[in-house]
Amino acid sequence: MRRGLLTSLLFLACLLGLAGSASAHAVLEGSNPARGAQLEAAPAHVDFTFNEPVEASLGAVRVFNTDGEQVQTDDLERPGDNADSVGAGLPADLPDGLYTATYHVISADSHPVSGGITFTVGKPGKGEAGFVQGKTISELLAESESGKVTEVAFWADRWVGYMAIALAIGALFWMLLAWNPVTAGNGEIDRRPVDRRFTRLVLAAALAGLLASLLAIGFQGAVGAGTSFWKAFGSGIPDEVIHTRFGTVMLVRSAAWLALIAVVLAGRGRFTKVGAVPLLAVVAGLVLAASPAFAGHASTRDPSWLLVPSDMIHVASMAIWTGGLAAMLWLLPAGTRQLEDPAERTGLLTGITLRFSAVALAAVALIAVSGSIQAIIEVGSIPDLVDTQFGRAVLIKIVLFAILVGIGATHRTRLIPKLLARFENSQSPGAPGNRFRQLLRLEVVLVVAVLGVTAALVSYPPPDAIQSGPVSGSVVVEGKQVEYTVDPARVGSNEVHIYVFDDQTGAPQPVRSMDVSFSLPSQDIAPIDAKVRRAGPGHFVAPSAMLGVKGQWLADVAIRLSRFDEPIAEFKVDVR
């Protein structure tokens, strides 16, 4: 385990010292009508185009009039049959007025992306200066989100799914790699009690995993459509999710669970020797271990040829190690308790522990290497470990992983030698055996915590996925919503778009002029003015803002509304 501890330290060092690049979160590239457009006639539809394919359900695009009524048609459109575009039709008799269109889609990495625009048709009436009864775009989007209850339930569902995978795979490999080799040829040990416990454990894990996989389809649909879990089931959304990448993976995972259930039921008592039944169970387990790679970040980010196999090795190794710990705690006592001779009981415990310790050491090394690869690519820098939800979750996993490795080192360097000594003296496990069992319980608790953090981790977009490519955001200053886009947010020349809206009405604001400057406090770079030009009502563009150093730049935007009114908006941009 000392090697495992050294590997984990190398993991942390690599993570903090290197940076990587990856594909971006879905970014809105354009809309039709354009943001803030003033149209003489009503458009036939509203379309949004992104820089990558997105998944969408009914209600992904909504168009509101000033009374808060949705005016789009019920059908979701894919303009030009392109997977990177979504839209909704509008009635031919759409009256003049101010309209707000919002989108809520799922990007390729399975995370939701949302936003909105406003546009006017004809000449809005006197009573139509505000929109949606005074609600802002952000408030409209918040109303279309699935809500905390659904989000927490989805996290719990993923948590159960990961625990099921760990238990099933870990118990299977513990039987094949630790239990069978040590007990083979020992006629004094009745293997049936252990086999019965193994069957119950794997069946319970498989049933829980099957249920979690099927429920995940409904939860993903609810998050994508911005509704509750129960409303998603009532609207046929799960059927739409099934035809997406995530839904397909969940169906494959469900099929693997069903196959494992069938194999375990048909192969009772046959897991004590090598044969077709254990082989089929191993194949089902490998499918389960591969499924997270295709349902999450790994398959949608560059370099996928490295991330996908790395994720598969990471999940399989973690399951073999952590699930094996649970098997040691639950299955092994069924074997040791039937031995009356203290020396034989100590010998069985020591033999199994030595065998599993070797397996765990290899698994820990693979976990550290594969985890390093993923963290280097997906986190990329020290600040992201602390400043982002994804980074903090990775940091928590590193800490828990280090504690688990430390406990494993205690097993290998202290407890196993004591057990060997007691076996040579024909003594019962005694105090070392009790200490061993206590540490196993602690390890299982820590494993449950690690899987809980992992369930949260996959719901967060990696920092580099958010920051690479165009960076967009908004700030509110003195009742004005200032939306910005910096493209490509990389060292060199960047195009900056700034829009100014009334935060209550969403209408473009009349701006007399605008001054924009960028500074980099961490490098003592004083404000650098960017030349801006007017591009439309409340819309200004800096076509070539030179951001020549990597780091977090601070933008100051002076918005001159009148002779005496000049609010200053500030926002930060991470330039890579």
Image (cartoon, rainbow, N blue to C red):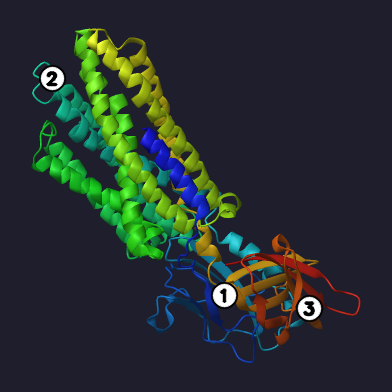
Q: CA distance from mark 3 to mark 1?
A: 21 Å
Q: Residue at x 38, y 41 (%)?
A: 160
Residue position marked by numbered label 2 in the rendering: 190
Q: Earlier in the sequence, mark 3 or mark 1?
A: 1
Q: Secondary structure at mark 2?
A: loop
Q: CA distance from mark 3 to mark 2?
A: 82 Å
How packed mark 1 is, by other alpha carbons closer than 10 Å (few <14, some 14-19, many 20 or more), is: some
Left or right: 450, with 119 as reference point: left
The x, y position of residue 538, in whole percent, is 73, 81
Q: Secondary structure at mark 3?
A: strand
Left or right: 127, with 111 as reference point: right
Number of numbered tags placed on the structure image: 3
Q: Amino acid at mark 3?
A: Asp
Asked whether 283 or 222 is in front, the reply is: 283
Q: Residue at x 18, y 22 (%)?
A: 193
Residue position marked by numbered label 1 in the rendering: 488
Q: Secondary structure at mark 1?
A: loop
Question: Can you say whether 54 is above or below 381 in the image?
Answer: below
Question: Can you say whether 264 is above or below 300 in the image?
Answer: above
Q: Earlier in the sequence, mark 2 or mark 1?
A: 2
Residue position marked by numbered label 3 in the rendering: 515
Q: CA distance from mark 2 to mark 1?
A: 67 Å
Asked whether 326 or 574 is in front, the reply is: 574
How packed mark 2 is, by other alpha carbons closer than 10 Å (few <14, some 14-19, many 20 or more), is: some
Q: Earlier in the sequence, mark 3 or mark 2?
A: 2
Asked if one can make out residue 451 in the rendered structure from this viewpoint, the answer is no
Q: Amino acid at mark 1?
A: Pro
Q: Nearer the viewer, mark 2 or mark 1?
A: 1
Q: Residue at x 23, y 27 (%)?
A: 197
Asked whether 73 or 433 is in front, the reply is: 433
Left or right: 316, with 38 as reference point: left
